[in-house]
Amino acid sequence: MALSVQLDPVLEARVGQEAKRLGMTKSGFVQDTLERVLGLKNPSQLLDEICSGTPMGDPNASENVSEKFKVKLREKHSY
């Protein structure tokens, strides 16, 4: 769902700077921030999960990385 929010120029510039610093889109940065503020995402809990040593995500994600990357690049740059 789309949401339009008006920001003053200084705040918009800061959002853009932080998003760029983190390698995110402005939209992704705002969404991530809202999730944390609203308690939907807890960085401390994520750190605990990572440190626990239990498998997370796709255990095969690191297989064939080079080939997967080439496929993504071809998809992105095919005209």
Image (tube, helix red, strand yellow):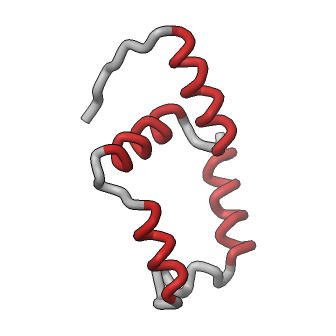
Left or right of residue 50, residue 17 in this image: right
Q: x, y (%) of residue 31?
A: 39, 41
Q: Quadrant of the C terminus?
A: top right
Q: Quadrant of the N terminus?
A: top left
Q: Which of 36 and 77 is in front in this view?
A: 36
Residue at 29%, 30% in the rendered image: 2
Left or right of residue 67, residue 1 in this image: left
The residue at the far left in this view is 1
In terms of image quadrants, where is residue 60? bottom right
Q: In this view, does 56 lie above or below 23?
A: below
Q: Is residue 19 above or below residue 77?
A: above
Left or right of residue 66, residue 2 in this image: left
Q: In this view, does 10 lie above or below 25?
A: above
Residue 53 visible in rendering: yes
Residue at 29%, 55% in the rendered image: 40
Q: Nearer the viewer, residue 76 or 22?
A: 22
In terms of image quadrants, where is residue 42? bottom left
Q: Nearer the viewer, residue 23 or 77?
A: 23
Q: In this view, does 70 lie above or below 14?
A: below
Residue 57 visible in rendering: no
Q: x, y (%) of residue 35?
A: 34, 47
The residue at the far front in this view is 44
Residue at 59%, 18% in the rendered image: 13
Q: x, y (%) of residue 43?
A: 46, 61
Residue at 65%, 44% in the rendered image: 23
The residue at the far bottom in this view is 54
